Amino acid sequence: MDLIEAAKAVRENAHAPYSDFKVGAAIRAASGRVYLGVNVENVAYPEGTCAEAGAIAAMVAAGETEIREVAVIAGSPMPVTPCGGCRQKLKEFGAAEVQVHMATMDGKVEVTTIGDLLPGGFSRDYMS
Ligand code: THU
């Protein structure tokens, strides 16, 4: 399954009446299964959640904890990058070299890695 296409399809279901900025995310986990998420906004604005967080929650709920590849897409002029909080969430389940494909609705794509998105990020090593 093409991850960007999967993210693009699920993006239609985003609940973004306040920002009018729909985001879709797709995560391929270790099993090969793909988990999807969208941003879900709330009238109490801070209660909204990001598409990446939704996809991670779906993956964990299905019993998986290892991210192998990520795609995120939005109707932005340039490929959308995960917010700071989502970078930390991705790091929890994905190795530094895991690729993150960032896409626009008109076909622009950039690729980065979880490690490059969060250099110096907090990890469990600090807690040992
Ligand atoms: N958003 C995401 O879902 N993922 C991102 O990577 C960037 C931002 C959402 C949060 C909010 O619902 C809307 O986009 C505008 O910030």
Image (cartoon, grey):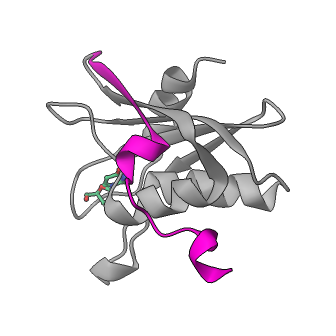
Which residue does the image show at 37% across and 74% down from the upper left?
42
How many badges with numbers are in the image?
0
Residue 120 in picture, x, y percent from top left: 39, 60
Query: Residue 47, can we see it?
Result: yes
Residue 70 in picture, x, y percent from top left: 54, 36
Q: Indicate the quadrant of ligand 1 in the picture.
A: bottom left
Q: Quadrant of residue 102?
A: top left
Residue 10 in picture, x, y percent from top left: 52, 37
**Does 122 lie within the magenta span?**
yes
> Where does the magenta region start and end?
107-128
Extreme residue toward the left, this view: 77
Which residue does the image show at 24% across and 35% down from the upper left?
75
| Position of residue 119 in the picture relative to residue 128 (left or right) | left
| Above or below for 41 versus 25 | below
Could you say which is closer to the camera, residue 92 or residue 81?
A: 92
Which residue does the image show at 68% across and 80% down from the upper left?
128
